[in-house]
Image (tube, grey):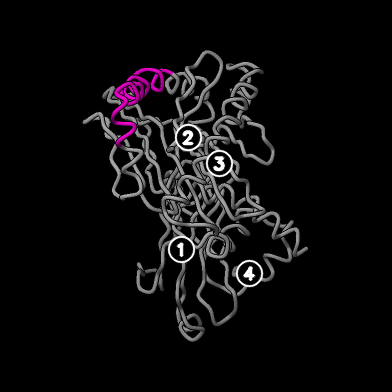
Amino acid sequence: MHGLIVLTVINYFIYFILFYFICIIKFFLAIHSWKAYYTGTTGLSQFPEFVALNLIDDQLMGYFDSQTNRFKSQFKWMEDNLGKDYDDQQTNILQGHATTFKVDATTLMKRFNQTQGVHTNQVMLGCEFDDQTGETNGFNQHGYDGEDFLHLDLKESRWISPVQQGIITVQKWNKDTGNTEYWKQYFSTVCIEWLKKYVQYGKSSLEKTVSPQVFLLQKSSSSSVSCHATGFYPSEVKISWMRNDEDHDEDVDLGELLPNEDGTFQKTSELKVTPEELKKNEYSCVVEHQGKTIRKTLTDGKILFMVRVIVLMSSFPIGIIVGVLVAIILLIVIGVVVFKVYQKKKGETETQILLSSLC
């Protein structure tokens, strides 16, 4: 059972390491986005050297890693509208990018005077479209070991790096005017055109509403209580606490919004309360999502001890287990705050993304 839990968490960790920062972006109905995340890693034997994810309106629409070496679409509407060859086309493109990332890993380690250890090279890119104002936006950012490495300033048509190790690449790319012109053209036309197509094709999926499941979790009778909401969509959710039917915001720690594998989200709020206070007062967790309110009162019958949750793994949604363990796994495996990584991809007749080596 322990081995099954570890393997399951490692599986989901692939998503969390790449998605961690995506989720701080708010979901607005008027603004649609297409994003791609590329991450190359070194020093992690059980983690793929290269992982790529495509998202439409913050929902996972495609996944690739160097271990499976295949791109996998996540929605039926993709096959219906983009054709059965879409996954093959994306696979070929991403296999090439995986090779580029492997070369870049060596280059970056040399620049930072590193010879071994766990390191991450990440790229984030995508575009946004406001269907009310018509305003568009594009972004292309690179990170290394959780820190900004370089990014494209579309307004000034130039690459910028905040670190000395990135100056070589910036000078090379800025000297090539075709590089910046390519990205300006790509973000203003190709990316937006495909974003609109994706939104049209996946309208039914993107406009769905899924209510959260709410659980109260506790390590022991003397530890803090976590209110865990999972499986909801869209991502906007409010979690608050009440004591004796009055708002209570003392000793409350609100966690980050995190994604589930199925495109839904999860979030946890932790309440630090002593057993004595818990006996003398009535505490409730209130979760508000899309006009619906779910209230859970802290009673012995409703608090699930984390040991029980892990043992009875098959009885509860995987989101609960991941929510409990992901912070620990993140610290053990990576030990750094992960920067966001995006890079953009599409198939069929779509123009292939130009991914330049850092060398």
Going from N to C along the chain, the mark reached first, 2 or 4, is 2
97 in magenta: no
Residues drawn in magenta: 171-193
**Amino acid on which disc 2 is placed:** Ala
At horizontal 58% and vertical 42% (from top left) the residue drawn is 50
Which quarter of the rendered picture does the N terminus lie within?
A: bottom right
The residue that mark 2 highlights is: 36
Task: Kindly check if marks 3 and 4 are in contact, taking CB atoms under 8 A apart as contact.
Answer: no
Residue 295 in the image, given as x and y percentages of width and height: 49, 60
Q: Nearer the viewer, mark 3 or mark 1?
A: 3
Q: Are marks 2 and 4 in contact (CB under 8 Å)?
A: no
- Front tag of 3 and 4: 3
Write down the residue under mark 1. Answer: 269
In this figure, which residue is indicated by the disc labeled 4? 306
Quarter of the picture containing the C terminus is top left
User: Judging from the image, what secondary structure is the residue with disc 2 in?
Assistant: strand
First along the sequence among labels 1 and 4? 1
Q: Which mark is residue 102?
A: 3
Instruction: Between label 1 and label 2, give the one nearer the viewer.
Output: 2
**Where is residue 242 drawn, in percent x and y?**
40, 68
Question: Residue 207, position in %: x, y?
Answer: 48, 31
- Rendered location of residue 184, percent (x, y): 31, 23
Mark 3: few, some, or many residues within 10 Å (few <14, many ≥20)?
some
Asked if disc 3 and disc 1 are in contact, CB closer than 8 Å, the reply is no
Q: Secondary structure at mark 4?
A: helix
